[in-house]
């Protein structure tokens, strides 16, 4: 009986395929475990070696082949555990990358919002400057009117002072 075994190199290649290509993960595992289990079961059920044991010749299963098959199964289970760990690590890494991506998008959105708020602030400052200039102009005009009115009042008082005669035509 020929025993199929999976080399460590092949197992690592399978693990890489499993981890980096999630859609093949289940099929690959199912295939290798089914193969390893079938090798063990065929090895234990097949009576293909005629051996002398305890003084009796009989057809028995090849113990060496069964041992190799069991080792292949143990290697496949170890590869499965490593693949699951690497798959979990890969999923966590992808989740972290997704979180980082969303945070970067939020940062870009906040930066854009800051630019818009800065523009709005500049417009408000320009409006404040324009209003301040209008207020200064109104104050200047008001001062000029107050001075004019005060001059008229002073002139009237001068005209109405006793002892001063004014000639009217």
Image (cartoon, rainbow, N blue to C red):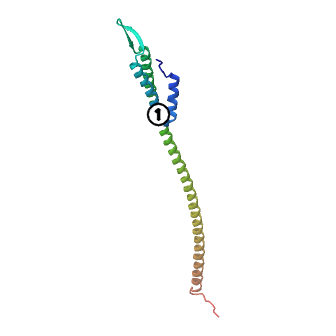
Q: Quadrant of the C terminus?
A: bottom right
Give whichever of 28, 160 is nearer the camera: 28
Residue 107 position in % (x across, y down)? 53, 47
Q: Is residue 152 above or below residue 5?
A: below
Please name the residue shown 57% across and 76% down the image.
146
**In this view, which residue lies farthest toward the top?**
55
Camera-nearest residue between 73 and 163: 73
Name the residue rendered at 51%, 28% in the picture.
14
Residue beneath the point at 56% across and 56% down:
116
Question: Is 129 on the left or on the right of 93, as rendered?
Answer: right
Q: Is residue 69 left or right of residue 111?
A: left
Vertical side of 89 occupied by 63: above or below: above
Residue 71's spot in the image, x, y percent?
A: 43, 19
Residue 1 percent coordinates (x, y): 46, 17
Q: Position of residue 144 (x, y in %)?
A: 60, 74
The residue lying furthest to the right in this view is 169
Mark 1 secondary-structure assignment: helix
Report the front residue among 135 and 49: 49
Q: Judge left or right: residue 137 versus residue 15.
A: right
Quarter-of-image position of residue 68: top left
Residue nearer the viewer, 94 or 116: 94
The residue at which mark 1 appears reads as: 27
**Image quadrant of residue 38?**
top left
17 relative to 8, above or below? below
Residue plotted at (52% across, 31% down)? 17
């Amino acid at each position: 009986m020929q025993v199929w075994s999976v080399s460590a190199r092949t197992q690592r290649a399978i693990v890489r395929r499993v981890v980096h290509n999630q859609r093949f993960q289940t099929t690959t595992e199912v295939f290798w475990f089914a193969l390893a289990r079938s090798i063990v079961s065929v090895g234990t059920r097949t009576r293909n070696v005629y051996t002398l044991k305890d003084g009796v010749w009989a057809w028995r299963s090849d113990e060496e082949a069964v041992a190799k098959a069991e080792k292949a199964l143990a290697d496949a289970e170890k590869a499965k555990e490593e693949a699951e760990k690497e798959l979990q690590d890969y999923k966590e890494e992808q989740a972290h990358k997704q979180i980082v991506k969303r945070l970067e998008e939020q940062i870009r959105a906040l930066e854009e919002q800051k630019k818009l708020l800065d523009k709005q602030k500049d417009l408000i400052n320009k409006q404040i400057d324009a209003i301040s200039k209008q207020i200064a102009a109104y104050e200047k005009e008001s001062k000029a009117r107050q001075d004019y009115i005060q001059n008229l009042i002073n002139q009237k008082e001068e005209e109405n002072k006793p002892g001063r005669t004014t000639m009217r035509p």
